[in-house]
Image (cartoon, rainbow, N blue to C red):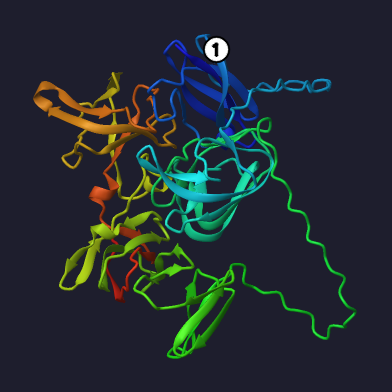
Amino acid sequence: MSCITYTLICPIGAVNEQCEWTITCCDGTKQRVILLEGTTTQPCINPSAQYSSTGGIQQNSISGSYSTQNISCSTACGSYAPAPSPVTPTPTPTPTPPIPPTPSTQPVPQYCLTGSDEVTIQNISGGNKFVFGGNYGTYGVTVGTYVLKNVPAAHPIAFQNFNLTNVITYTGTTSVGIKNGLDGNPYTYYYGDVTLTVVGGPFIISYECFYHGYMGGENNLIFNSTTCTGPAPTPPTPTPVPSPIPSVVPPVPSPVTTEYTLTYSESVQGWPSFYSYIPDMMIGMNNYLYSFKGGNLYKHNTNETRNNYYGKQYDSQITSVFNQEPLQNKVFKALNLESDSAWSVNMETDIQNDGFIDYTWFEKKEGAYFSYLRKTGTIPAAADEYALRSANGIGKVSSWSESNNVLTLNFSTNPLVSVGTIVSIGDYIYFSEGAYTTVSFSGQITNIEVNLQSGINRIFVNTNITGSTIISESQPYILYIKNMEAETHGMLGHELTFTLTNYNTTATELFAIEADVMKSYP
């Protein structure tokens, strides 16, 4: 069995002053590791264990981080503190000079980012991948600033730096909004030029697309100050000595931080449209629009291909909001597009932020396109889902057992803990332990057996699902959440912000957007 030493870190300021993981040790046993804030440990872990998509380690707390040290080991679990003990006040010790820590081996990336890398989307091993600088593999960075050039609008990117903003941050030219990433934490997604700022390490983080998941980015960005060198600084442009011409009025700084091409409409007496392309110069002549880009002359609107400027294809996007009666809490049920084609729709409200309708889900009815609103949700569910009507309680179990990734939950028949007829195969099971202040994901229901005369009242759960957590106490409280996309009843909120995206290269007309809305009665 090949085992590797991992480093578990619980930072100063950790939530609840501690961090928790579940690990699969080298001897095959599963153990809980709890660290107090400001402490670390290095257990011996079997990374090939099929515990989750992360291998032999699962993080159970909000705070904390871990990294692979690529050091082989063979001890059972290594040395770690199984649980924090209450701190007993002790007299302040006499200060002693700090002992520098022994440097650990940093994972070696396949490619180091250069400081300015072009982003492309390539089909590798049967799936689309983010490719930085023309080569795909694990990417490494060190302290410095990195610019990822031309992230496509169809694949806005976010970097999972939750609890790591003290060592790595990112921003971009154009944001498509905020939503919960695949790790359950909220991130802002950008396209265009995305800038990474790294001030320290270590870390191994993931990056993902707003629409399509990781796209090869899971645990694919590594801090390595040994293999990778910092990006070369851009030499400053010499400032010419200005002529001594007095300025009568000081220049007014522009409030615009992102460059656009704007169009003026005579009908509305205003500037209603923003375009992504930026020419060097434009001129209207003989009822045609001409522009220059890179020394080349272009004549616009001369073919049927729309949204292609200077050899680059763009998507059409429209963002608006339904906010009638903003003080009323409403359920947004469906959308109707008065259009000659279907559009993809991203939606968010002031309460829920991850609704989505793919353009293939629309049905054409009476000349318009109709679709129910689907709340996509995440598995495990985001923390904001537990307070909504999508989460329902069952009760405490009387006993439970687990074997071969199948969890059996036994409920009392006298007094009766009713499973209820609304619970069905395919629902997701969650549990709460101890003080019942946190909720953890357990798995998906595979079977339900209820025979009260025979004393049978139980649920079978498949725990071999990414993100599942092992139950540790005898009588946890059980709750369930329906499949959000299949069982969705709409999106809840006072207002609904939506962005429509059309990928067509031909002319498309959109006349009106309608929503089916009803008042919410909690």
Q: Position of residue 118 (x, y in %)?
A: 55, 51
Q: Position of residue 339 (x, y in %)?
A: 27, 73
- Point 49% across, 74% down: residue: 274
User: Left or right: 108 with respect to 313?
Assistant: right
User: Left or right: 250 with respect to 413?
Assistant: right
**Kind of element beneath mark 1:** strand
**Residue placed under numbered mark 1 in the picture:** 73
User: Left or right: 434 with respect to 240?
Assistant: left
Q: Position of residue 469 (x, y in %)?
A: 39, 29
Outermost residue to the left: 453
Viewport quadrant of the N terminus: top left
Q: Amino acid at mark 1?
A: Cys
- Point 40% across, 67% down: residue: 317
Q: Say which of 141 and 456 sits in front.
A: 141
Against 440, residue 166 (above or below) is below
Can residue 414 be seen here? The reply is no
Can residue 396 be seen here? The reply is yes
Outermost residue to the right: 244
Viewport quadrant of the C terminus: bottom left
Q: Say which of 241 and 380 sits in front.
A: 241
- Point 74% across, 49% down: residue: 233
